[in-house]
Image (cartoon, rainbow, N blue to C red):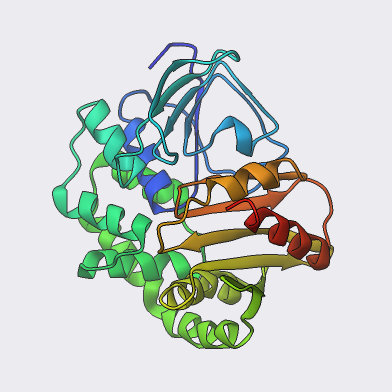
Amino acid sequence: MKSTILRIIAHGDWDGVVGAGLLSRIQDLPLEFPLELPDLIVENAACIEITPGRVKNMRNSLIIDHHGTQPREGVDEQGNQWILKPEYKAVSSLIADHWKLDFPEEWRKAIEEVDTATLNTELSQTLWKAYRVDAKSFPRQQTAEMVKKGEWKQLQELAEKQQTEYQKIEEKTVELLGKSTKLTPEAVYFTFRFNDRWERGASKNAMLTLEEKIPIVIAIGLEEKGVKGGTVATRKNIDLTRIYDYLRSQDYSSGGHKNVGGFQVLKSKTIEQTLKDLRKALKHL
C-alpha cells in the first residue's frame, strides 16, 4: 500500500473485519469499523467495502471492494485508487489473493458462504449465528487482531461462544415474518427496530425466508425519529443497482450488488416517505 495510507476503514461484517485483519498484515495501521457512514469524511485510508457513494466525502484513499457489476481499477478524480473485482464472492478473498496472504481454505470458504448467505459448512453456520446475535456489538477489533495473527482456532472458539443466544434470533424471525407486507406486486417489506439487537439480528434471517417465495424483499430499520436505513435483496435475475441509483437521488446513501444492497437516510424520513421512495425506485427495474 501507499505510504500515504494512514488507517484502515472497513465494513463491520465478517467479510470486512476479516479483510481488515488480513490487510493489517501488510501495514500495521489503526483499524476503524464505523457504524454510521453518511456523514463520514475519509482521506488517506484503505477502505474495505466502503465506497464514495456511501460516505460524505472520500479522497486520496485506496478502495477495495467486490460489490458492483463491473470491475474497476486505476485512480478517480478524487485521487482514490480502486481495486474493484466483482468476480470475488468475498472481499477478504480478494485481499488475500491480491497481496498473496495466507488465508486457510476452510475460513475462506466459510466467509464466502456467510457473505452470500449460502451456509453449507458448520463453520459458516457458526459464524453466521455469532454475528446475528449482536451485530452492533460484534467484537470487531478482537476478531481482526486474531486474523492478523493467524489465530484461527481461537477465533472459531470465540464465534462458538458468541452464538449461544441464537434461539432468541429465531424467535424474533418468526415475529418479523408475520409483519411482512406487500409493497408492489413483486416486492414485500417489513420493518424492524434498528436499536433492538434481536430484531436487527433476525432481519436478515427473515429476508432469506421471504426470498424463497417473493422476487424482491426489503427490510427497513426504524429509530424513534423515523427511518434509519434498510436492505434490498432478490434471488431472481433482477438488477437492483437501478434502485440504488434512484435512492441516491432522493437523499439516501445506497449501493451494493445486483442481487443485494442497502440504503441509509441522509435526511430525516418517515416510513411513509421511504415507502413512497421505494415504490418509485422499483419502477426503474
User: Residue most toward the left?
Assistant: 105
Query: In the shown orientation, is residue 23 left or right of residue 105?
Result: right
The reply to whether residue 106 is in sight is: yes
Q: Quadrant of residue 119?
A: bottom left
Q: Quadrant of the N terminus?
A: top left
Residue situated in front as seen by the camera: 15 or 147: 15
Instruction: Name the residue rendered at 49%, 74% in the picture.
Output: 214
Residue 128 pos. (x, y %): 37, 66
Taking 77 as reference, is 9 above or below it? Answer: below
Q: Quadrant of residue 69?
A: top left
Residue 125 pos. (x, y %): 29, 70
Query: In the shown orientation, is residue 126 left or right of residue 254?
Result: left
Count of numbered marks: 0
Instruction: Name the residue rendered at 63%, 51% in the picture.
Output: 284
Instruction: Name the residue rendered at 30%, 30% in the picture.
Output: 25
Query: In the shown orientation, is residue 151 left or right of residue 51?
Result: left
Residue situated in front as seen by the camera: 31 or 274: 274
Residue 8 pos. (x, y %): 48, 31
The reply to whether residue 137 is in sight is: no
Residue situated in front as seen by the camera: 242 or 127: 242
Residue situated in front as seen by the camera: 7 or 178: 178
Taking 189 as reference, is 147 above or below it? Answer: above
Query: In the shown orientation, is residue 243 left or right of residue 47?
Result: right
Residue 48 pos. (x, y %): 45, 36
Instruction: Name the residue rendered at 75%, 56% in the picture.
Output: 277
